[in-house]
Amino acid sequence: MTTRGTTWKALLGSALLACTLLAPQASAAALTEVTGFGDNPGGMRMHVYVPDARPAKPAVVVAMHGCGGSGPGFHSSSEFASLADRHGFVVIYPSAQQEAGFGKCFDTWSEAAKRRGGGSDPVSIVSMVNHVVQRYGGDASRVFATGSSSGGMMTNHMLALYPDVFKAGAAFMGVPFDCFANAADFPPGRSRCTGGSMNRTPQQWGDSVRRVNPGFTGPRPKVQLWHGTADTLVPYSLLQESMEQWTDVFGVGQTPTSTDTPRPGWNRSRYGADVEVYSVQGAGHTLPSSGMAAVALEFFGITGSPGPAPGPCSVKAKVTAWNNGLVESLTITNTGSAPVNGWSLAFTLPTGQTITSGWNATYSPATGQVTARNTGHNAAIAPGGAVEIGFQSTHTGNTAAASAFALNGTACAAG
């Protein structure tokens, strides 16, 4: 009788807790769609994330999704929004509308898109930047581009077309500017660019950029390039081609001026002061992963160096399970000596579990490798302090706790 009573109380408590998860939670700034932002030949959609706390002239980051994705999807799956809360910059999330055979992708192939002011997506993106500068007082001298896959391709594209608009860019899994011959050359499987055999000389790649603005004499935006060694969708060999393009544009050689490994598996090569290349060992078509956005922002000069680790942490997990559901609470403790101001907690959800709701954080995606991000009321964790978050999940029999926790890219000990 005692066992049944205890079990019933546990189930009732879990059910009541599950109901509370559906209640509205306090939050920071919200992602907002913007219409009528200016000339939009690409027919693109625009979302913007404006943090509540920001300077009078905040920096502006254009963050671009991969093929088949969207601006809101990249907002929820990347760390740029939580970093914007911490550092006070505005994030533009464009949504591509060009169908490319396997989802909507940014146009980096058409002749219009390869000309400055020629039309298509690049002109739409510049209109978004101008809108944010005018509407939110964004700093026109601190505009940056970044993106994943198709968004990484467009990052290199925008730096080539509009060096007077962008100060720097970080391209994840991209290709060099002018790699695609036309629309027919874009889809995987029949693309010369991404077919694995693309090989031009550094000067040929550099000439592609110089032809866009033959009279341009101003400073070029610095470039950070990221690629996984196990990427087969956008071949790893294209990292070499992108490096050759930008080193030639900057007039530096293809031999690194320095090399190091700032994080395990992240092999960094620097070519002068303006080109930085990350080869990520064993990574497939999965970038950016946890901590990489912060490194990109440090390269842009928006933040200080994140260093090898932001400080030690621990996470204690507690699971209450029933039938095909469970509730898990996570206590995140800052065991370091410095405060944490804005955080994201990455963790692995056991196979068969799917998050259906949560509290004190936002969660994305709902399965697999999940990232929880702070809400407006719990962004700060003082030294020795802790925050508690949690979620409700369905399961198919595996009721184990989440594992492999990392706070702002730093592994946490089990509490």
Image: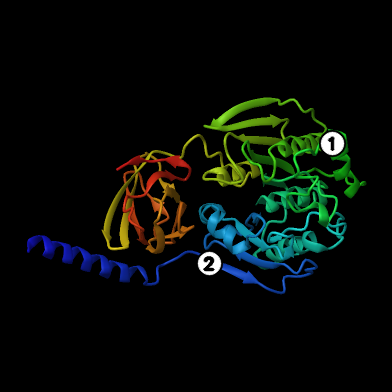
User: In this figure, which colouring scheme has been used for the structure?
Assistant: rainbow
- In the image, is residue 394 above or below residue 287? below
Q: CA distance from mark 1 to mark 2?
A: 44 Å
- Residue 174 percent location from the top left of the image: 71, 46
Considering depth in this image, is 119 or 183 the residue closer to the camera? 183
Q: Nearer the viewer, mark 1 or mark 2?
A: 1
Q: The residue under label 1 is which amino acid type? A: Arg
Other-residue count near label 1 (Cα within 10 Å), few / some / many at <14 / 14–19 / ≥20: few
- Residue 218 percent location from the top left of the image: 84, 44
Q: Taking the image as drawn, is residue 27 in sight?
A: yes
Left or right: residue 15 compared with residue 176: left
Which corner quadrant of the image does residue 217 belong to?
top right
- Residue 206 percent location from the top left of the image: 85, 39
- Residue 117 percent location from the top left of the image: 86, 60
| Residue at figure coordinates x 52%, y 45% from the top left | 290
Left or right: residue 301 compared with residue 107: left
Considering depth in this image, is 393 or 64 the residue closer to the camera? 393
Residue annotated with mark 1: 200
Residue annotated with mark 2: 30
State yes or no: discs 1 and 2 in contact (Cβ < 8 Å).
no
Q: The residue under label 2 is which amino acid type? A: Ala
Which corner quadrant of the image does residue 3 belong to?
bottom left
| Residue at figure coordinates x 7%, y 61% from the top left | 2
Circle 1 SS class: loop
Q: How many marks?
A: 2
Marked residue nearer the N-terminal end (1 or 2) = 2
